[in-house]
């Protein structure tokens, strides 16, 4: 049996982030050859990937990067917060994001097929999942085109990487207000930019629901149209960014804040880990 020192085990563990016993066993099997031990650990982990395929991934990170004409944001997911806060997982997120920044990929399937250092992004993720010992997946990607961008990444826990991310595309010069709107989005979670963007089918379904609720409350028929429209207004405040009350001053709407700052919001996206 090869003479494997604690220093060798420590060095390989720091390189790969693997467990003490697995690292020692791999080095023994490889007769002290580091590169062969890495291969052994990867093969062992790759076999485990298939077993982990059905596991849930409720932890992870959000990362975003701006390129010349677009900003790319991803959600990289894993199983536990222990892995989510590890240096190797964060480094993997940075590697994946860098590979996708200028790729033009707008879907997960397209992103996984992008090449980085002679491998696909999907293969890079699988290789690292094998070492980390957890299911790791690229859950979401969005590419927002625009003139200028404000990126806001929020840590819900100081020990974890960002768990909420917002990309705001805008036109104008008031960068500070643009950032405050991005922060507002992280809190208020709108789905659409304006009420005109809400699909007609969704509006009609909401109209039907609030009318049924109003009738069930015994509201007079003559008053129903006004009541329904009022409740629809509340619905639009929930789902449409420009209709929402500004988080920093609820006496102002976002549309008013945007107008005063001479900004035009052209698009946005919000990701939250596991949501």
Image: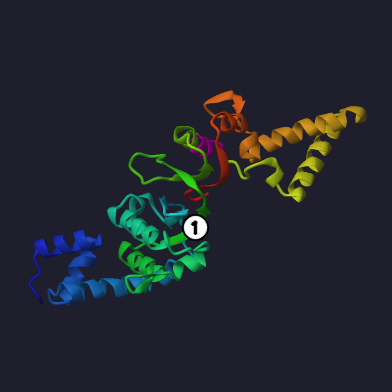
Q: Is residue 213 above or below residue 223?
A: below
Q: What residue range appears in magenta?
A: 181-188
Q: Is residue 117 left or right of residue 53?
A: left
Q: Residue at x 32, y 70 (%)?
A: 117
Using the image, determine if residue 228 lies above or below residue 30.
Answer: above
Residue under numbered circle 1: 141
Q: Horizontal placement of 154 versus 32: left or right?
A: right
| Residue 54 seen from this side | yes
Residue 144 horizontal/vertical position (percent): 52, 53
In this rendered view, identify the residue nearer to me: 254 or 22: 254
Q: Which quadrant would the N terminus be assigned to in this image?
A: bottom left
**Residue 186 included in the magenta stretch of the image:** yes
Specify the farthest residue to the top.
Answer: 251
154 sits to left or right of 203:
left
> 201 left or right of 78?
right
Residue in the picture at 36% in, 64% down: 129
Residue 255 at x, y percent in the picture: 62, 33
The 10 Å Cα crowd at callout 1, few under 14, some 14 to 19, many 20 or more, is many
Q: Between residue 25 and residue 225, name the one nearer to us.
A: 225
Write the residue at 18% across / 76% down: 29
Q: Position of residue 73 (x, y in %)?
A: 46, 53
Magenta span dominant secondary structure: helix
Q: Secondary structure at mark 1?
A: strand
Query: Residue 116 falls in which quadrant of the image?
Result: bottom left
């Amino acid at each position: 049996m090869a003479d494997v020192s604690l220093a060798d085990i420590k060095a390989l563990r720091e390189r790969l982030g693997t467990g003490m016993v697995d690292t020692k066993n791999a080095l023994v099997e490889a007769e002290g050859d580091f590169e062969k031990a890495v291969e052994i650990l990867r093969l062992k982990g790759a076999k485990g990937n298939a077993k982990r395929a059905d596991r849930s991934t409720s932890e992870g990170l959000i990362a975003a990067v701006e390129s010349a004409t677009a900003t790319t944001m991803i959600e990289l997911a894993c199983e536990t917060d222990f892995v989510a806060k590890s240096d190797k997982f964060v480094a993997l997120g940075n590697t994946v994001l860098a590979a996708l920044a200028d790729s033009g990929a707008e879907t997960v399937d397209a992103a996984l097929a992008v090449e980085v250092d002679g491998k696909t992004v999907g293969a890079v993720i699988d290789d690292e999942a094998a070492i980390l010992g957890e299911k790791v997946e690229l859950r979401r990607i969005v590419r927002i085109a625009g003139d200028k961008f404000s990126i806001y990444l929020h840590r819900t826990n100081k020990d974890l990487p960002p768990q909420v991310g917002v990309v705001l595309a805008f036109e104008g010069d008031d960068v500070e207000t643009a950032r405050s709107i991005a922060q507002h989005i992280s809190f208020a979670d709108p789905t659409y930019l304006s009420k005109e963007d809400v699909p007609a089918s969704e509006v009609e379904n909401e109209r039907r629901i609030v009318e049924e609720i109003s009738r069930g409350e015994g509201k007079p028929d003559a008053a129903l149209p006004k009541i329904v429209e009022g409740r629809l207004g509340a619905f639009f405040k929930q789902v449409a960014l420009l209709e929402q009350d500004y988080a920093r001053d609820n006496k102002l709407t976002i549309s008013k804040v945007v107008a005063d700052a001479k900004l035009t919001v052209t698009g946005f996206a919000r990701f939250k880990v596991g949501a």
